[in-house]
Structures are given as structure tokens and as C-alpha cells.
Amino acid sequence: MTKREIQVRVPGGMEASPVALLVQTANRFNSSIYLETGTTKVNAKSIMGMMSVVLNYEDKILITADGADEKEALDAMEQFLTHLA
């Protein structure tokens, strides 16, 4: 299991379109991927779960990945959340 804190750099925060793209990114990997903010923890592969989380520009979140491709999964999630600008 690998964890990484990431600061969101998506202009305007995470609205429907970026959330859908993030879920697609997560689903490219076999690892389990979870996103945590405050007391909320959601499955990053679940569109409904991700839509329930409010993420704003510069929010800090924790992403956890567990599986054979966990490092690659975290790298892809971080790339998406920090370079979408």
C-alpha cells in the first residue's frame, strides 16, 4: 500500500467533467485507489463516490493505492490533479 498527499491544481476545482476524467484515469489500473479529504474517504474508481466529494483548487488530499501497479496509479492520479491547469 502506498499513500501520497497531493495538492489539487485543477482550476475551478473538481466539477463533473474533471471528476469523470479522474475516474477514467483511476480505472486504468488494477490497484484499489482511494481518495481522502477531511473525514471523507471514497473509491476513486466510483463516479458516484467522487461526485460526492468537494475538491477545490489548492485543497490537500491523500490518495492511497494498493496493488501491483500502485506506484503507477499514484503517479497518474497526481499528474492529473496537479497538471490539468
Image: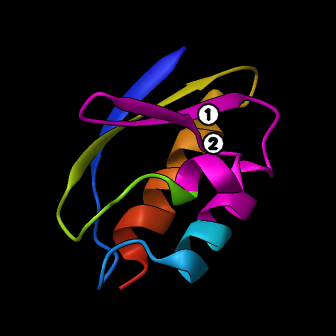
Neighbour tally class for label 1: few under 14, some 14-19, many 20 plus, Cα within 10 Å: many
Cα distance, mark 1 to mark 2? 8 Å
Q: Residue at x 32, y 75 (%)?
A: 13
- Magenta run includes residue 69: no
Closer to the observer: label 1 or label 2? 1
Q: Quadrant of residue 76?
A: bottom right
Looking at the image, residue 75 sits to the left or right of residue 66; the answer is left
Q: Which residue is the site of mark 1? A: 33
Q: Which residue is the site of mark 2? A: 73
Q: Residue at x 66, y 53 (%)?
A: 48
* Residue bounds of the magenta highlight: 22-50
**Percent x, y for residue 85?**
35, 86
Q: Quadrant of residue 29?
A: top right
Q: Which mark is residue 6?
A: none
Q: Amino acid at mark 2?
A: Ala
Q: Residue at x 60, y 63 (%)?
A: 22
Q: Quadrant of residue 62?
A: top left
Q: Amino acid at mark 1?
A: Ile
Which SS class for mark 1? strand
**Percent x, y for residue 17?**
59, 82
Q: Residue lying farthest left?
A: 58
Q: Nearer the viewer, residue 55 or 60?
A: 55
Is residue 19 shown above or below 15? above
Is residue 33 shown above or below 23? above
- Magenta run includes residue 28: yes
Dot 1 and dot 2 residues touching (CB under 8 Å): yes
Which SS class for mark 2? helix
